[in-house]
């Protein structure tokens, strides 16, 4: 039976260490946990990133893709936490954890999930700059190309 993913969309920062420990606590079938932590960069004078979403819809969309990862790879656990609201450079935005008995399944599932989150998760991202300018973040061809490898 596939693992049940833990999904959270929240404005507060997360504790990656505590979330990682939660996936392996009391288990002897976890051989590895792959992780990805996305952090807000300060490119080109960026002073903040504002992420908007529709509560309920976003969680359901992430849960669907995380469940797909749990069905596609033999995961013993999966966690996806994505923040929303105003995020400053250096702060974490997203955490993806995939636990499995074997590293390849964990690594592939983690990459699949972050590629999907980057290209298809229903978030709208607005950048704020030190000079007062703002701009909406557009999709990038290289992100779409990375996600395309999982089709099929």
Image (cartoon, rainbow, N blue to C red):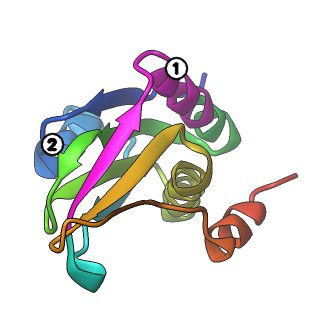
The residue lying at 54 percent from left, 50 percent from top is 113
- Where is residue 18, by image quadrant? top left
The residue lying at 13 percent from left, 50 percent from top is 17
Left or right of 71 on screen, residue 113: left
Q: Which label is found at residue 77?
A: none
- Secondary element under disc 2, as helix, strand or loop, is loop
The residue lying at 69 percent from left, 73 percent from top is 141
Q: Which label is found at residue 14?
A: 2
Viewer-closest of 135 and 2: 135
- Where is residue 111, by image quadrant? bottom right
Viewer-closest of 28 and 51: 51
- Secondary element under disc 1, as helix, strand or loop, is helix
Magenta extent: 47-66
The residue lying at 88 percent from left, 52 percent from top is 152
Viewer-closest of 135 and 104: 135
- Where is residue 151, by image quadrant? bottom right
Indicate the position of residue 107 as horizontal and vertical percent values: 50, 63
Give the answer, above or below, for where 38 lies relative to 7.
below
Indicate the position of residue 94 as horizontal and vertical percent values: 32, 51
Indicate the position of residue 1 as horizontal and vertical percent values: 60, 22
**Residue at mark 1:** 57
Which is more foreground, mark 2 or mark 1? 1
Number of other residues with Cα within 10 Å of mark 1, as a class: few under 14, some 14 to 19, many 20 or more: few
Indicate the position of residue 44 as horizontal and vertical percent values: 29, 84
């Amino acid at each position: 039976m596939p693992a049940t993913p833990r999904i959270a969309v929240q404005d507060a920062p997360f504790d990656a260490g505590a979330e990682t420990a939660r996936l392996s606590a009391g288990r002897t079938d976890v051989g590895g946990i792959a992780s990805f932590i996305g952090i807000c960069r300060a490119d080109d004078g960026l002073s903040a990133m504002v992420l908007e979403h529709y509560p309920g819809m976003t969680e359901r969309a992430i849960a669907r893709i995380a469940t797909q990862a749990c069905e596609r790879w033999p995961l013993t656990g999966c966690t996806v936490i994505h923040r929303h609201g105003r995020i400053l450079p250096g702060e974490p935005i997203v955490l993806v954890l995939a636990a499995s008995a074997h590293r390849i399944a964990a690594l592939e599932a983690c990459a699949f999930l972050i590629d999907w989150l980057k290209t298809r998760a229903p978030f709208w991202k607005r950048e704020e700059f030190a000079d007062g300018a703002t701009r909406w973040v557009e999709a990038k061809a290289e992100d779409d190309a990375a996600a395309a490898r999982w089709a099929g």
